[in-house]
């Protein structure tokens, strides 16, 4: 009997344990389901809030006004680019650095769903959630650059190198905003720089890059002369110096030419580069050596004139127009022979010039002759008359680099 009672109690305990285990499992299951439901409800509410239009626009407004650039890419996306870096939004954010412009942006997005032509409010739904974001549309901008070889930078990023003068460049897929437009032309004649802050929000906008420089051509009678820039030889001959540069028009760059002649090396005047595209370089071919050579030629020619007059023989004159010169000086002879004596001649260096014509050098010399015509008998001067003539001497350089007088005439 006692054994049966023990067995009955044992069975009751077993049934109680089985019931308790089942009850616990049911309770845990109910708790888990409830927890999942609560979490789902919380996530749903948070999701609806986090991606709602109001939340997105309010946070974008806050980020722009407080210049929190790192938060902008949370609420904005660039067209066709889901992975936009923070730095790409800086030009866009700089454009909205003005609070009134931010207010216009947010108001238009709330009411119209877009701002101008480059910002649009979009909703990409996911399950039951709204997913609002602001899409920024890329634009193409045009830049007109006046010189070839110019490097174009936007915010210090190289975008293009021009291939010709006055090239119209299209910079594609630019994020609308404020940029630092910079242009650098670095060539063998110097460097030109341009920098300007630009606002680019429309593909119809044209920006002009006007580098302050000039392409230079040299005009000279001496095509084979060497060209010097700021006292440095350029290894370019004057005849080949055509449309070179660009040179900075405001740097005081000086250009001159230099050439070696039989009588020495001659340098032209120095001319500063300005906005004038053609530089005319003239050379004064006179120097002390040549002046001495020409003076000697004139002196010999003048002496020959007076020797010819006293000998009454025009062939002594050292010039090609002997008869013309002889008749210019001769005084009619009456009984006694005339005596001609040179008292002074003035070699006017300042009024003289050397020119090149048809590959031949000519010197044009002006001088004043003072002389006396007298009559003597047995050494006694019976009559005398002082005279003065202004003369022109044309002297030609021969192939052997000697000079000869080819023409003389009196200046009336």
Image (cartoon, rainbow, N blue to C red):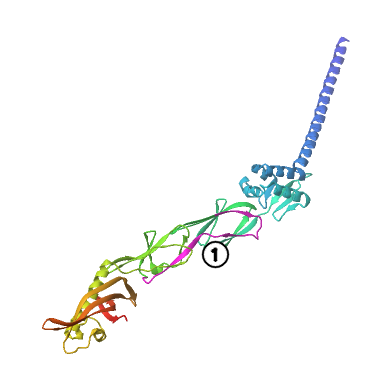
In the image, 60 versus 246, the foreground residue is 246
* Dominant secondary structure (helix, strand or loop) of the stretch shown in magenta: strand
Considering depth in this image, is 357 or 318 the residue closer to the camera? 318
The quadrant the N terminus occupies is top right
Q: Residue at x 84, y 23 (%)?
A: 19
Front residue of 230 and 128: 230
Q: Nearer the viewer, residue 30 or 208?
A: 208
Q: Residue at x 26, y 73 (%)?
A: 346
Residue 95 among magenta residues? no
Specify whether residue 197 is painted magenta.
yes
Left or right of 153, for residue 175: right
Image coordinates for residue 227, horizontal then vertical, percent: 38, 64
Asked whether residue 22 appears in the rendered view, the answer is yes
Note whether residue 401 is visible: no
Classify residue 97 as left or right of residue 35: left
User: Residue at label 1?
Assistant: 166
Q: Quadrant of the C terminus?
A: bottom left
Q: Which residues are magenta?
A: 195-222
């Amino acid at each position: 009997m006692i054994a049966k009672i023990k067995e009955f109690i044992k069975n009751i305990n077993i049934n109680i344990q089985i019931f308790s285990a089942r009850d616990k499992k049911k309770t845990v299951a109910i708790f888990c389901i409830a927890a999942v439901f609560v979490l789902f409800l919380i996530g749903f509410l948070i999701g609806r809030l986090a991606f709602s239009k109001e939340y997105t626009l309010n946070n974008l407004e806050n980020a722009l006004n407080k210049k929190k650039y790192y938060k902008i890419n949370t609420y904005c996306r660039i067209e066709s680019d889901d992975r936009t870096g923070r730095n790409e939004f800086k030009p866009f954010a700089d454009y909205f650095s003005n609070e009134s412009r931010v207010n216009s942006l947010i108001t238009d997005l709330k009411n119209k769903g877009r701002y101008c032509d480059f910002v649009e409010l979009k909703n990409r739904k996911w399950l039951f959630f709204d997913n609002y974001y602001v899409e920024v549309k890329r634009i193409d901008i045009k830049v007109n650059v006046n010189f070839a070889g110019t490097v174009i930078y936007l915010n210090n990023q190289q975008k293009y190198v021009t291939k010709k003068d006055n090239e119209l460049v299209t910079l594609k897929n630019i994020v609308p905003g404020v940029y630092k437009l910079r242009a650098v032309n670095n060539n063998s004649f110097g460097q030109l720089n341009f920098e300007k802050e630009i606002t680019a929000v429309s593909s119809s906008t044209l920006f002009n890059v006007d580098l302050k420089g000039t392409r230079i051509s040299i005009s000279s009678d001496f095509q084979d002369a060497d060209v010097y820039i700021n006292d440095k030889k350029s290894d370019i001959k004057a005849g080949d110096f055509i449309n070179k540069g660009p040179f900075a028009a405001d740097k005081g760059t000086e250009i001159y030419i230099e050439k070696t002649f039989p009588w020495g090396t001659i340098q032209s005047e120095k001319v500063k580069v300005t906005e004038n595209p053609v530089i005319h370089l003239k050379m004064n071919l006179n120097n002390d050596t040549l002046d001495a050579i020409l003076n000697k030629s004139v002196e010999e020619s003048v002496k020959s004139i007076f020797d010819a007059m006293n000998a009454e023989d025009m062939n002594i004159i050292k010039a090609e127009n002997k008869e013309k010169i002889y008749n210019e000086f001769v005084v009619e002879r009456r009984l006694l022979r005339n005596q001609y004596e040179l008292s002074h001649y003035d070699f006017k260096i300042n009024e003289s010039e050397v020119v090149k014509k048809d590959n031949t050098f000519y010197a044009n010399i002006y001088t004043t002759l003072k002389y006396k015509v007298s009559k003597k008998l047995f050494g006694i001067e019976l009559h005398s008359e002082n005279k003065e003539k202004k003369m022109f001497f044309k002297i030609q350089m021969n192939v052997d680099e000697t000079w000869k007088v080819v023409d003389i005439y009196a200046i009336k």
